[in-house]
Amino acid sequence: MVAEIIITTDEMTPALRRLADGMTDMTAPFIDIGEYLIRSTKERFQAGVSPEGVRWAPKSPATLAAYGARKSNRVDTRPLFGPSGSLSSQIFSQPGPDRVEVGSPMIYAAMMQFGGTKAQFPHLWGNIPARPFIGISAEDEVQIIDILSEWLKGLAEPGA
C-alpha cells in the first residue's frame, strides 16, 4: 500500500517556487530536506509523538501479550517499537527533481500511520489506533524553510 501526503504551507510553497524558478532539477535540495526529515522522524519515534506533538496511544494489553507469547527476549512497551525495531530504523527518503518522498518500506507502516480496526482487517488481534509518524511538524517546517533559504542564497550568489 502506498500513501501520499502532500504538504503545502503559506511559507514553504512560495520558497519552493522561487527555488524551482532558479533550478531545472531540485534533487539536491530535496536530498537535504529528505535527510533532515529522516532524522526528525526518528526523533519522533524516540519521543513517541506524532508530527503535531500528540503522544501516541500506548500498546494494548493484547499486543503486549502477543509479544510475550512469542517469547521475545525483551518486550518493548513503547508504541511502534516491535521486537525487530524495523519500523523506526528503516525510515528512508527518495529525492527526485520535483519532490522528496519520506516513508518506511515495512508492509505494516500504513496501518501504524493511519490505524485500522479488526472489523476492517480480521487478521489483526485487535484494533490499531492511528499513530502518525510520517509528516511535517511546525519545527520541521521552520527547518525546511531554512534549508530552502540556504539554497536560495546559493542561487543569488555570483557564480552560483
Image: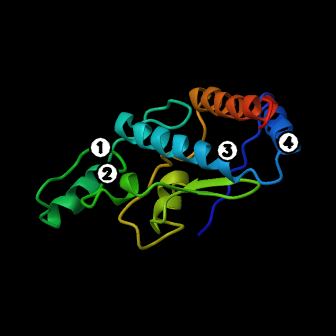
Q: Which mark is residue 36?
A: none
Asked if labels 4 and 2 touch by Cβ distance under 8 angstroms, the answer is no
Q: Amino acid at mark 3?
A: Pro
Identify the residue position indicated by label 3 in the image.
29
Residue 12 lies in what quarter of the image? top right
Q: At 47% from the left edge and 49% from the top edge, which residue is drawn?
A: 129
Identify the residue position indicated by label 4 in the image.
22
Q: Is residue 64 above or below residue 7?
A: below
Whether residue 95 sits left or right of residue 14 in the image: it is: left
**Where does residue 22 sit, x and y in percent of width and height?**
85, 42
- Element class at badge 4: helix
Q: Nearer the viewer, residue 108 or 136?
A: 136
- Element class at badge 3: helix
Nearer mark to the viewer, of 4 and 1: 4
Nearer mark to the viewer, of 1 and 3: 3
**Where does residue 154 sit, x and y in percent of width and height?**
73, 33
Give the Cα separation between the discs numbered 2 and 4: 42 Å
In this rendering, does residue 11 appear at all?
Answer: yes
Q: Is residue 40 above or below residue 145?
A: below
- Marked residue nearer the N-terminal end (4 or 1): 4
Q: Amino acid at mark 2?
A: Phe
Identify the residue position indicated by label 1 in the image.
78
Q: Which mark is residue 81?
A: 2
Nearer mark to the viewer, of 2 and 4: 4
